[in-house]
Amino acid sequence: MILDAIEKRYSVRHYKDQPVEEDKLAEVLEAARLAPSGSNLQPWKLVVVRDRATIRSMVHAIGGQQFVEQAPVLIVACMNGEGYNLGHRYEGAVIDITIALDHMTLQAASMGLGTCWLGNYDGNEIRALLDIPSENPVVVLLALGYPDENHPHRPRPRKPLDELVCWEKFTG
């Protein structure tokens, strides 16, 4: 059930020293491929980084977040085209990429893998390290691997539904 994967998903910041199997990585990437996008443009390119030295060299560019070094896989999501236009250049592409990555996080959670969205990064430094062309801006990064159970997850509280949903008209 989808809600099971949603409930299991959390931002993993401690990973086991265990590689992600090729078939599982392929399923996570397939979830992105199947994600909806405006006009079916799929305006993304995913750079999958598994080389430990490369991941270590990226830590500085990712705001010094040391836990990233533990992740056996780092996925860099870049724009590959502008996407549909919502009045602001690239807005549609950014929305589509976030949908694709959310699909990936849920697929990963359903298979016992953990992920962490990384939004604190220097896009120019990441592009230089991975030879990403300037016309393909970095949108978000995703750490992927097996969660380390020695660092238990404590669920964060969520607002009750009645604070998040209004019926028929907006109410404050």
Image (cartoon, rainbow, N blue to C red):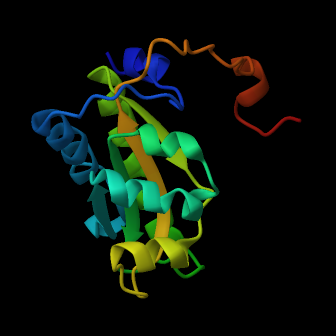
Asked if residue 166 shows in the view, the reply is no
Q: Vertical placement of 153 versus 93: above or below?
A: above
Coordinates of residue 42 in the picture (x, y in percent): 29, 65
Q: Quadrant of the C terminus?
A: top right
Q: How many marks?
A: 0
Specify the farthest residue to the left.
23
Q: Is residue 139 left or right of residue 29?
A: right
In this image, 159 relative to 52: left or right? right
Is 29 drawn above or below residue 154 in the view shown? below
| Furthest residue in direction bottom, as rendered | 134
Rendered view: 114 above or below 59? above
Which picture quadrant has residue 89? bottom right
Task: Indicate the position of residue 145 as horizontal and vertical percent values.
Answer: 34, 33
Residue 146 percent coordinates (x, y): 34, 26
- Residue at 60% x, 48% y is 65
The answer to whether residue 9 is seen in the rendering is: yes
Residue 70, x across and y down, in percent: 43, 38
Side (left or right) of 41 relative to 82: left
Displayed quadrant of residue 80: bottom left
Which residue is drawn at the image coordinates 33% and 80% (left, top)?
131
Judge by depth and name the residue closer to the eye, 49 or 133. 49
Can you tell which quarter of the image residue 66 is in?
top right
| Drawn side of residue 164 relative to residue 107, left or right | right
Q: Residue furthest right?
A: 172
Considering every residue shown, the one lying at the far front of the view is: 53
Q: Which quarter of the image is occupied by the N terminus? A: top left
Give the residue drawn at x 27%, y 51%: 50
Image point 32% across, 41% down: which residue? 72
Camera-side residue: 45 or 74?
74
